[in-house]
Amino acid sequence: MKRLNIKVLFSIVSLVTLTLACSSFSLPGSGGGGGGGGTAKVILKDDFSNTSSGWGTGTDTNSSVEYTNGALQFIVYTGYYITWSNPDTKTYQNYHVEVTVTNSSPDPLAIFGIICHEQETQSFYYLGVAADGYYTISKSESGKDDVSFTNGTDSSVPTGGGPFTLGADCGNGNLALYVSGKKIASAQDATFTTGKVGLFAWTDKQANGANVTFDNFVMTELPQ
C-alpha cells in the first residue's frame, strides 16, 4: 500500500507547545524494556486521572489534545496534519514506553503512537501504527525529508478500535515497536540517543480523520 507524504508532515505543523513541569518518580515495576518480563525501574507513569499531571494540551482549528474521561485524547481536524504532546521538558535516554490506545479515528490511515528522543529543534523518532495494519519506525529531522527505517503491515495491529497496548524501545541506537507485547518491527539509528518523550496522532487526507485516546502511560528503564 502507498502511504501519503508522511515525510512532509512533521516539518510543516505542530500544535502542542505548552508543556508543564511534571515530576517523574522511580519504583519497582514489572514489564520494561524489550517487552519482556522481570522488574524494571519506572521513570514516569501516568493514568491521566489528574488533569494537571503535566502533558501539553490545547485546542485550535487544526487539532486538539485534552484530558478527557481519565485519558489523554488527540483529535486532528485537518487533513495531512500531526499533533503531539510531551509529559514534561526533561530529556531521557535508554527507555521503554507502554501505553494503552483506543482508536476511534474515522480515517483508517490515521497513524498514532510514540515519539522518542525529541530534540529542541523538533527532530525526533516516531513509532506508530494505523487501523489498516500499517506500522512505521521513522525519523523526522528538522529541515530534511523524513526517513522511514522500516514500514509495512502486520496482522498484530488491531483493525478495530481497541483498547490495546502500544510499546516502544527508545534505546541508544536501537528502536523497536510493540503491539500487545509482541515486537513487530525494529531499527537501528544513533542520530539521537537522548531527548523528550511524547505521544502523537496524524491524519491522512481525510479531515476530522484522527481521534485517538491514550491511557496508562508507563516509561521504564531499558536494560543496559
Image: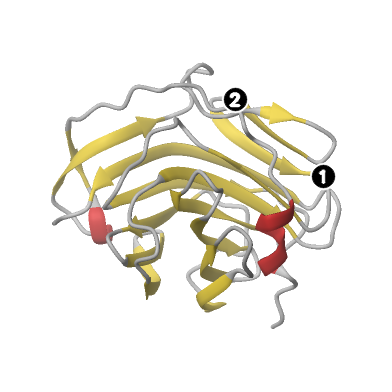
Q: What residue is shown at x 81% (from left), y 41% (from top)?
A: 62
Most foreground residue, 195 or 46: 195
In which quadrant of the rendered view does residue 91 lie?
top left
Most foreground residue, 145 or 111: 145
The crowd level at tag 2 (other Cα within 10 Å; few <14, some 14-19, many 20+) is: few
Which label was assigned to residue 69? 2
Q: How far apart are marks 2 and 1 (CA)?
A: 20 Å
Q: What residue is shown at x 57% (from left), y 33% (from top)?
A: 72
- Look at label 2 and name its amino acid: Asn
**SS for dot 1:** loop
Q: Is residue 220 left or right of residue 37?
A: right
Which label was assigned to residue 77? 1
Compared with 190, 28 (above or below) is above
**SS for dot 2:** loop
Q: Is residue 154 visible?
A: no
State which quarter of the image contains the N terminus.
Answer: bottom right
Residue 83 location (% of width, % of height)? 66, 45
Residue 208 location (% of width, % of height)? 83, 48
Q: Can residue 126 be seen in this view?
A: yes
Which one is closest to the eye, mark 2 or mark 1? 1
Q: What residue is shown at x 59% (from left), y 71% (from top)?
A: 133
Most foreground residue, 141 or 2: 141
